[in-house]
Image: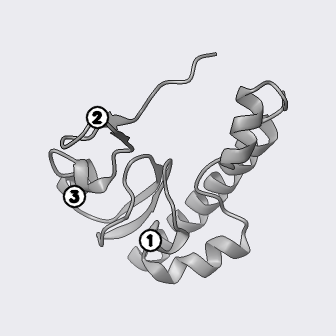
């Protein structure tokens, strides 16, 4: 297994930085699609922006409150133990081969993402009467 480097060089120094929503070169596809969108766990979209629908950013999201739109969903996501990413400490241990089992953490995130997506789809369909 390999781990890809997703950091980019900073334009004003030799330091590396994690790309974020401000680094996009063009509008995200959900802005171009029209209609409501449910966008979950998309890397490098922190902090999220207002949109027609729901959006949670993914890898590298620092703060849950700035990672979820609309903000009214934050408390519901926390109640469901929704996580934006794998615990970085667990990843460090896994990379150092001190903790060979990170898959339960990944499975938890995927399962919660599926649950949230299903619930949001049901809400959108209910609102649209479809």
Give the vertical position of 8 relative to 27 (above or below): above
The secondary structure type at the circle numbered 2 is loop
Q: Quick one: 4 or 107, which is closer to the camera?
A: 4
Q: Is residue 127 left or right of residue 49?
A: right
Q: Quick one: 41 or 98, which is closer to the camera?
A: 98
Q: Which scheme is used to colour this image of the protein?
A: one colour
- Quarter where residue 37 is shown: bottom left
The secondary structure type at the circle numbered 1 is helix
Residue shown at 56% from the left, 76% from the top: 74
Task: Give the distance between the C-alpha atoms of the residues marked 3 and 2, in whole angstroms.
Answer: 33 Å
Give the vertical position of 6 relative to 22 (above or below): above
Question: Where is mark 3, residue-wise?
Answer: 31
Residue 66: mark in rendering: 1
Circle 1 crowding by C-alpha within 10 Å: few under 14, some 14–19, many from 20: some
Question: Can you give x and y, in whole percent of width and height, for residue 68 in the image?
Answer: 47, 69
Question: Where is mark 2, residue-wise?
Answer: 14
Q: Earlier in the sequence, mark 1 or mark 3?
A: 3
Q: Earlier in the sequence, mark 3 or mark 2?
A: 2
Q: Quick one: 18 or 86, which is closer to the camera?
A: 18
């Amino acid at each position: 297994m390999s781990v890809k480097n997703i950091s980019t060089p900073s334009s004003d120094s030799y330091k590396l930085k994690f790309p974020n929503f401000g680094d996009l070169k063009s509008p995200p596809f959900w802005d171009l699609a029209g209609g409501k969108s449910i966008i979950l766990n998309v890397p490098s979209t922190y902090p999220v922006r207002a949109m027609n629908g729901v959006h949670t950013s993914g890898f590298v999201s620092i703060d849950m409150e700035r990672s979820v739109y609309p903000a009214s969903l934050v408390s519901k996501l926390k109640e469901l133990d929704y996580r934006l990413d794998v615990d970085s400490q667990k990843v460090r241990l896994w990379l150092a081969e001190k903790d060979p089992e990170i898959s339960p953490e990944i499975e938890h995130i995927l399962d919660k993402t599926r649950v949230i997506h299903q619930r949001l789809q049901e809400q959108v369909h209910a609102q649209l009467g479809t």
